[in-house]
Image: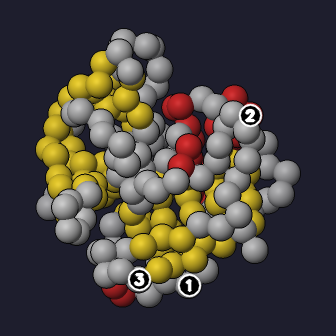
C-alpha cells in the first residue's frame, strides 16, 4: 500500500506520521513486514517501529487512525521543524498537503479549508469539504498560529455516500500521550502499542 506521510518533530526527534490504516490492516489484524518512507528529495528512510492506539488495533475506531513511525536514521536538518499541535479549535482554517500522481512525475498539491466537527456520524473526528482521492490517506493537516506552522492531524477517509467530505482524527490530549509514548516504549501499556519491524 502507498500512502502520504509527513515528518513531525517531537522535541528534537523527527517522527513520520501517517494514517494507522496505512500500516495496520484491521480486518486481517496484520502489520507489514517492512515500511519505507520516501521524502521529497527521493531519500528512502527505513522505519524501525510503529506506534498505534490500542483503540485502532482492537476495535478499528477511526477516531484513532493516526500512526507514529519511528525511523531508523533520518537527517533532521533536511526537514522543516514542524511540531505537532493538539486541541486546535474545531472551527479553524487549515492547510492539507498531499502528493498527486502526474503523467510524468508526482506533484505536491495543497488545499486550504475550514474544518468542522463530525455532526453527521457523531464521532470525535474533524472534516473538511474536499473530494478524497485514492492515496490521500496520511496527508498532513497543518494549522498556522503566530506565523508558525504546526501539524494538527492527518487524512483518514471519506464516506462512500459523500465523497466530497474528507475526515481526520482530532488530535487531542490522547494523541499527545501517544507522542509521549513514542519516546519510551512500555510493552504492556494500556492505551498504546509499539511494533518492531526489525
Asked if 128 appears above or below 87 in the picture, the reply is above
Residue under the image location 20 percent in, 60 percent down: 102
Please indicate, yes or no, whether residue 179 appears anywhere in the rendered image: yes
Q: Which residue is mark 1?
A: 73
Q: Which residue is mark 2?
A: 58
Q: Residue furthest front?
A: 103
Q: CA distance from mark 3 to mark 1?
A: 11 Å
Q: Give the x, y percent position of residue 142.
A: 27, 52
Q: Is residue 127 left or right of residue 62?
A: left
Secondary structure state at the residue bearing disc 2 = helix
Q: Is residue 134 left or right of residue 54?
A: left
Q: Residue furthest right?
A: 188
Q: Which residue is mark 3?
A: 43
Of residue 94 and residue 128, the one placed in the foreground of this image is 128
Q: Give the x, y percent position of residue 73.
A: 56, 84
Residue under the image location 39 percent in, 63 percent down: 6
Image quarter of residue 83: bottom left
Earlier sequence position, callout 1 versus callout 2? 2
Q: CA distance from mark 3 to mark 2?
A: 34 Å
Amino acid at each position: 500500500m502507498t500512502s502520504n506521510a509527513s515528518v513531525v518533530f517531537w522535541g528534537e526527534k523527527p517522527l513520520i506520521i501517517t494514517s494507522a490504516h496505512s500500516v495496520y490492516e484491521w480486518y486481517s489484524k496484520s502489520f507489514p513486514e517492512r515500511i519505507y518512507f520516501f521524502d521529497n528529495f527521493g531519500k528512502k528512510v527505513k522505519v524501525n517501529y510503529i506506534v498505534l492506539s490500542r483503540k485502532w488495533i482492537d476495535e478499528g475506531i477511526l477516531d484513532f487512525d493516526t500512526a507514529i513511525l519511528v525511523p531508523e536514521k533520518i537527517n533532521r536538518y533536511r526537514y522543516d521543524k514542524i511540531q505537532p499541535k493538539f486541541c486546535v479549535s474545531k472551527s479553524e482554517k487549515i492547510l492539507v498537503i498531499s502528493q498527486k500522481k502526474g503523467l510524468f512525475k508526482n506533484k505536491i498539491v495543497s488545499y486550504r479549508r475550514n474544518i468542522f466537527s463530525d455532526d453527521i456520524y457523531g464521532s470525535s473526528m474533524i472534516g473538511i469539504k474536499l473530494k478524497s482521492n485514492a492515496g490521500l490517506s496520511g496527508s498532513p493537516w497543518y494549522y498556522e498560529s503566530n506565523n508558525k506552522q504546526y501539524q494538527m492531524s492527518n487524512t483518514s477517509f471519506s464516506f462512500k455516500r459523500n465523497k466530497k467530505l474528507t475526515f481526520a482524527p482530532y488530535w487531542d490530549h490522547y494523541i499527545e500521550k501517544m507522542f509521549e509514548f513514542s519516546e519510551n516504549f512500555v510493552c504492556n501499556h494500556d492505551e498504546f502499542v509499539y511494533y518492531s519491524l526489525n
